[in-house]
Each structure stands twice: as structure tokens, then as C-alpha cells.
Image (cartoon, helix red, strand yellow):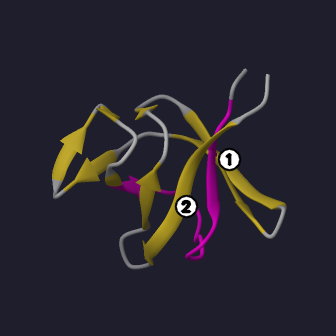
Amino acid sequence: MPDIKLGKVTHYYDKIGVAVVELNADLAVGDTVKFVRGGEELFSQKVSSMQEEHKSLDSAEAGQAIGLKVSQEVKDGAEVYKVVE
């Protein structure tokens, strides 16, 4: 089954390790996501924490812009996919 495109990184806060992602699909804590830029997979990780307007979320829907805690630096414009197993 192909991975689901979730959206794009619109900003990265390097001091706190958080990427702002505009969602095109639903996402929940515990899902596995991967970050891709220029056709190259950067890294994958499980979603451990996400927020909207400084409020913690267990899940988010398409259309929301969320802050996602990431394990590595990621550049603006990187595409985010939900890994389907």
C-alpha cells in the first residue's frame, strides 16, 4: 500500500526541534511519518508529540497546521508522508 501524503513543512524551529506542517490528511500520535525533500527520503519517525496553538493534540485533521516534534532538522518545503504498513 502506498504511503499517504500528509502535507509540507512550512517552518522549522531549530531551537526546539519542531516542524510546522500544513496537513492534507489526518494524523495521530503513534503514526509513523517520513520526511522527503527533492525525492530523497530524509528520515522516518513515530509521532510522539504534536500541538496546535500551544495545545497538545492526540490527533489532527486535514486543513490544520500543527507543530510536530521531530528527531532531526528538516528544511521548509520538505514533504511529509504517513507510512502505511
**Residue 69: image x %, image y %?**
42, 55
The one nearer the camera, 16 or 50, is 50
x and y percentages locating residue 7 in the rendered image: 54, 53
What residue type is disc 1 on? Ser
Nearest to viewer (mark 1 / mark 2):
2
Q: What residue does disc 2 label?
A: 8
Above or below 24: residue 30:
above
Q: Which residues are magenta?
A: 66-83
Q: Name the N-terminal-most of marks 1 and 2.
A: 2
Residue that numbered label 1 is attached to: 44
Name the amino acid, label 2.
Lys
Q: Is residue 12 left or right of residue 35?
A: left
Q: Tell me where residue 84 sits by quadrant.
A: top right
Is residue 81 rendered magenta in the image? Answer: yes
Mark 2, other Cα within 10 Å: few <14 / some 14–19 / many ≥20: many
Q: Residue at x 59, y 70 (%)?
A: 74
Label 1, label 2: how many angstroms apart (C-alpha)? 15 Å
38 lies above or below 29: below
Question: Looking at the rendering, which quadrant does residue 60 occupy?
Answer: top left
